[in-house]
Image (tube, rainbow, N blue to C red):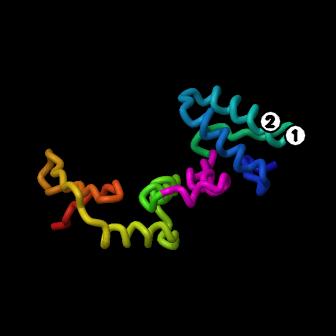
């Protein structure tokens, strides 16, 4: 059997992902994490899982966007939230994601309500707060 945890494509997968995020991510003890993961897998898939990853970093965690999508909540998110919830382990955002275009459009069209200058460091850093409560860090390059 493969040494990595396999995510199955089923209706149970989104519930499993949400349960793992809720109960396991905050656990700092690896043994507790693996035991809890095993219990959750048995709960959703019923069969005994033979192989559980030995280290926490070997488990691929889903993005929050995939959980929101599985519960049909994506339409309720702002473009800023959609980008934030799509952060993955290996990428901040996917360039093909339509939410990226929506955020760029917001940056272009939304009026700026407040500008805050961050202190410290040698470079100028500004935080723009937009009308729709989105926030963006502006840090010009040399």
Q: What residue is shown at x 19% (from left), y 65% (from top)?
A: 140
Residue at which label 1 appears: 47
Looking at the picture, how far across and down is residue 135, in whole percent? 31, 55
Q: What residue is shown at x 46% (from left), y 58% (from top)?
A: 78
Q: What residue is shown at x 71% (from left), y 43% (from top)?
A: 16
* Residue extending farthest right: 47
Q: Is residue 100 magenta?
A: no
Total number of numbered labels? 2
Up the image or down, 132 lies above or below 105; here it is above
Looking at the picture, how far across and down is residue 121, in whole percent? 15, 48
Q: Image check: 98 left or right of 43? A: left
Q: Nearer the viewer, mark 1 or mark 2?
A: 2
Looking at the picture, how far across and down is residue 5, in whole percent? 72, 47
Residue 110 vs residue 86, the one in the foreground:
110
Q: What residue is shown at x 82% (from left), y 48% (from top)?
A: 1
Q: Image check: 128 left or right of 30? A: left
Residue 110 vs residue 22, the one in the foreground:
110
Residue 43, numbered label = 2
Sort mark 2 into few (<14), some (14-19) or many (20+) by Cα contacts within 10 Å: few
Q: Quadrant of residue 37?
A: top right
Q: Secondary structure at mark 1?
A: loop
Q: Secondary structure at mark 2?
A: helix
Instruction: Give the residues in magenta.
Output: 59-77
């Amino acid at each position: 059997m493969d040494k990595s945890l396999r995510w199955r494509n089923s209706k149970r997968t989104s519930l499993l992902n949400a349960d793992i995020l809720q109960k396991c991510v905050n656990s700092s003890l690896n043994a507790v994490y693996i035991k809890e993961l095993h219990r959750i897998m048995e709960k959703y898939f019923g069969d005994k899982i033979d192989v559980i990853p030995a280290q926490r970093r070997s488990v691929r965690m889903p993005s929050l966007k995939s959980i929101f999508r599985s519960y049909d909540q994506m339409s309720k998110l702002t473009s800023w939230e959609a980008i934030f919830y799509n952060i993955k382990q290996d990428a901040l955002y996917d360039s093909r994601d339509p939410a990226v275009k929506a955020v760029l459009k917001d940056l272009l069209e939304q009026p700026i309500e407040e500008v805050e200058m961050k202190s410290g460091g040698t470079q100028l850093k500004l935080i723009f707060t937009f009308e729709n409560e989105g926030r963006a860090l502006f840090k010009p390059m040399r």
